Amino acid sequence: MAPVVSKIAIIGAGVSGLAAAKQLAHHNPIVFEATDSIGGVWRHCSYNSTKLQSYRCDYEFSDFPWPERDNNTFPSHTEILDYLQSYAEHFDVLKCVRFNTKVVEIRFVGDREAAADFTGKPGNLLPGHPVWEVAVQTNHSETIQWYAFEFIVVCIGKYGDLPKFPEFPRNRGPEIFQGQVLHSIDYCKLDKEAASKLLEGKKVAVIGYKKSAIDLALECAEANQGPNGQPCTMVVRTLHWTVPHYRVWGLPFYLFYSTRLSQFLHARPNQSFLRALLCLLLSPMRRGVSKFIESYLLWKLPLQKYGLRPDHPFEEDYASCQMAIMPENFFPEADKGKIVFKKASKWWFSKEGIEFDDDTKLEADVVILATGFDGKKKLKTILPEPFRSLLEYPSGVMNLYRGTIHPLIPNMAFVGYIESVANLHSSELRSIWLARLVDDKFKLPSVEKMIQQTTQEIEISKRTTRFYKRHCISTFSINHGDEICEEMGWNSWRKKNWFSEAFSPYCGEDYKEN
């Protein structure tokens, strides 16, 4: 059967996929969504207690405000899904989405000789003939339907789908454990009643100390109230800074990192010699800001009491987008003994539970692995060679120009892979940029210059945080947005607004189009 031919494919209908579909709607894209609903990780990787970690007004599309956007409570994942559904319906995006259609293979059918020549400028993103073929399974059937496209936008993200599991010594894995082992993604599939039944009265070990592990431990503690309740043990390898709210010693948090003036303290790509010198001279102030925030967190939260003080500066967690909001009742549950902590660099399973490298043991009935996801492997399952090997760089980070275009992969874009202080806004801005690029309203620089730009960004991240492989641009997100808008042909009024917040993603009041 001949493939169905169309212009643009979008893979995934999460936040990034919806943003891309809306901006590219005039090309009638086909959106392939493997599940029966939109929302991505908000639909399939959320607990019953999962909430957004920012206010409504800081997590909204530029042309679609939240109802009651000034409500200062953090919206639940169900409220976010309602918001995304309203957005999709308002802009008639759902007509592009084909649900229960899983992409199982992508095949390059363009000019292989031209694709292998990485020395010149990229060609037209819509060349008028198919460049990629996409194999799709619908409703879990064994039948494969092929489609042909001029351009593909990959929006499957780094989270969900493929869980990351720790490696264990021989005969020390979960197969010898007599209890139950599951990954956090499996826990997400449980309804409230099933989750409570799993946790109630059980000795539970949660592996991890990021936001999903923290929320999971709290749910476990709340399910084990009363005299028969068992404590939940968090097994922590790497500590990270957490914040109780968005104020530090009475000052709003955004003043420290999310203004043009505050970001002036941090290195950024394409800075002049004088700008680099000034940044170096101001480095004591940058370290002072980090120490100032740490002093508040150590005063406000019992991190010292529970041995949870990280050994790295707060700035490194912010620079890698790992700053998490600590639920208000988390430490009160720890004070009651419902949440306990075990720090360990290495551990493995035994019949009764877990053993650690310090020769201690932990009995457990249930072990939940909040150990993250393998986003790179997820991409590799569909991307063909030779492009698949381009995901493996010595830095461990995928080079994406403007967080969207891989300089060496033709006629393909990636939205939602570089993290920022507000991922929804980043996805929307990059989708706007991509739509204008596809419409030939501006040109990409040469492959050499794009690689130079991405290399600079990665090198800056390396100098800023040991967790640079997360590929977060939070410390220079305003500059990143400025460069994107200017590349689209919009003049920046940045000098007039030193205190504009970094999570304002669109050119709005700070920019005007030529």
Image (cartoon, helix red, strand yellow):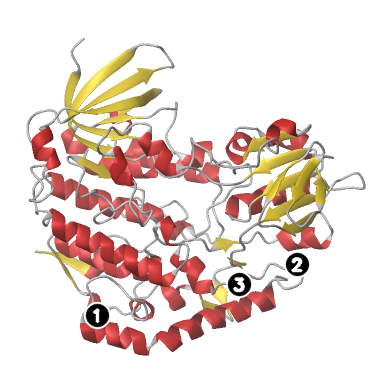
Residue drawn at x 76%, y 45% as measured from the top left? 354
The three-letter code of the residue at mark 3 reads: Asp
**Image position of 448 with respect to 201: above or below:** below
The three-letter code of the residue at mark 2 reads: Tyr
Which quadrant would residue 21 be assigned to in this image? top left
Looking at the image, the residue that sits furthest to the front is: 170
Left or right, residue 82 beside residue 245: left
Mark number for residue 306?
Answer: 2
Disc 2 to disc 3, how far (Cα)? 14 Å
The three-letter code of the residue at mark 1 reads: Lys
Q: Do the residues labelled 1 and 3 touch (CB within 8 Å)?
A: no
Looking at the image, the residue that sits furthest to the right is: 227
Quarter of the image where the N terminus is located: top left
Disc 1 to disc 3, how far (Cα)? 38 Å
**Image position of 445 with respect to 99: above or below:** below
Q: Disc 2 vs disc 1: which is toward the camera?
A: 2
Residue 461 appears at what percent x and percent y? 38, 66
Quarter of the image where the C terminus is located: bottom left
Residue 498 appears at what percent x and percent y? 31, 80
Specify few, some or many for label 2: CA neighbours under 10 Å numbering under 14, 14-19, or 20 or more: some
Residue 355 appears at what percent x and percent y? 77, 47
Mark number for residue 311?
Answer: 3
Which quadrant would residue 114 be assigned to in this image? top left
The residue that label 1 is drawn on is 496
Specify few, some or many for label 3: CA neighbours under 10 Å numbering under 14, 14-19, or 20 or more: few
Badge 1 marks a residue whose secondary structure is: helix
Badge 3 marks a residue whose secondary structure is: loop
Specify few, some or many for label 1: CA neighbours under 10 Å numbering under 14, 14-19, or 20 or more: few
Left or right, residue 83 beside residue 214: left
Q: Earlier in the sequence, mark 1 or mark 3?
A: 3
Residue drawn at x 69%, y 71% as measured from the top left? 301
Q: Which of 263 and 360 is in front in this view?
A: 360
